[in-house]
Image (cartoon, rainbow, N blue to C red):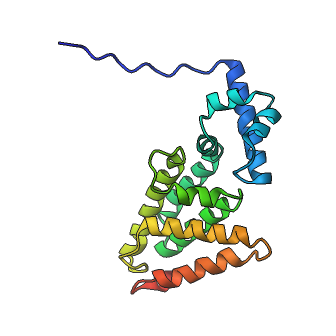
Amino acid sequence: MAISAAPTPARPMRADARRNYGRLLSEARTAFAEHGTDASLEDIARRAGVGIGTLYRHFPNRHALMNAVFQEALTSLITRSRELAGAEQPCRGLVEWLGAIITHAGEYRGLAQALMSTSRDETSALAQCNVPLREAGAALLARAQASGAVRSDVSIDDLMQLTNAIALAAEQSPDDPELAERLLMLTLQGLKGPSAEGC
């Protein structure tokens, strides 16, 4: 009988590779904040002091780099969802969390569009952002629906697409800083269930 080999653990990065990785992430954060998520990868590599080949060794495509850049914000959003899971008014907890997603997506021009376009693509590196966010939001939504504050036919996929659409609309209207909040409030009117006092 053949014995299956145990999976080989990933080798730790050499010190110089770790430094390159860290510099690339730092420069990508800056470039994405200044120029949007379609910033030149060649410029990011150059500013990090490495060649484009080194960037691609660490991040095989733009979405992989975006995923790495957004992990810190993702962790913060997941942590916030756990804190809001015990909110006295479940609908308000859900709304606050959706607002936090819109705020985060607005920090980088192009992020909302990228998240929308890959929302159902499990092969995209951005699935590592989309999937945990959907799971966190689903728990908040289920609680709000159980309280009667949100209609039972609302899905987390619909809400995630709506929040990304709101972030995208706000991105396109930088002269209207209140737009995202207004659109979120309008969206909530369509979500309300029979016991929507807490929403």
Q: Position of residue 165 (x, y in %)?
A: 59, 69
Left-right relation of 36 to 105: right
The residue at the point 33 percent across, 16 percent down is 5
Q: Taking 129 as reference, is 59 above or below it?
A: above
Left-right relation of 174 to 124: right
Q: Taking 44 as reference, is 100 above or below it?
A: below
The answer to which image quadrant residue 78 occupies is: bottom right
Q: Position of residue 138 (x, y in %)?
A: 42, 62
The answer to which image quadrant residue 4 occupies is: top left
The answer to which image quadrant residue 166 occupies is: bottom right
The residue at the point 52 percent across, 85 percent down is 189
The residue at the point 54 percent across, 58 percent down is 117
Left-right relation of 175 to 58: right
Q: Is residue 39 visible?
A: yes
Image quadrant where one finds the N terminus: top left
The residue nearer to you, when weighing 114 against 163, is 114
The residue nearer to you, when weighing 18 against 167, is 167
The residue at the point 71 percent across, 32 percent down is 22
The residue nearer to you, when weighing 63 against 23, is 63
Q: Taking 96 as reference, is 75 above or below it?
A: above
Q: Can residue 80 be seen in this view?
A: no
Q: Where is residue 130 in the image (x, y as percent from the top left)?
A: 51, 53
Number of on-image labels: 0
Q: Taking 10 as reference, is 180 above or below it?
A: below
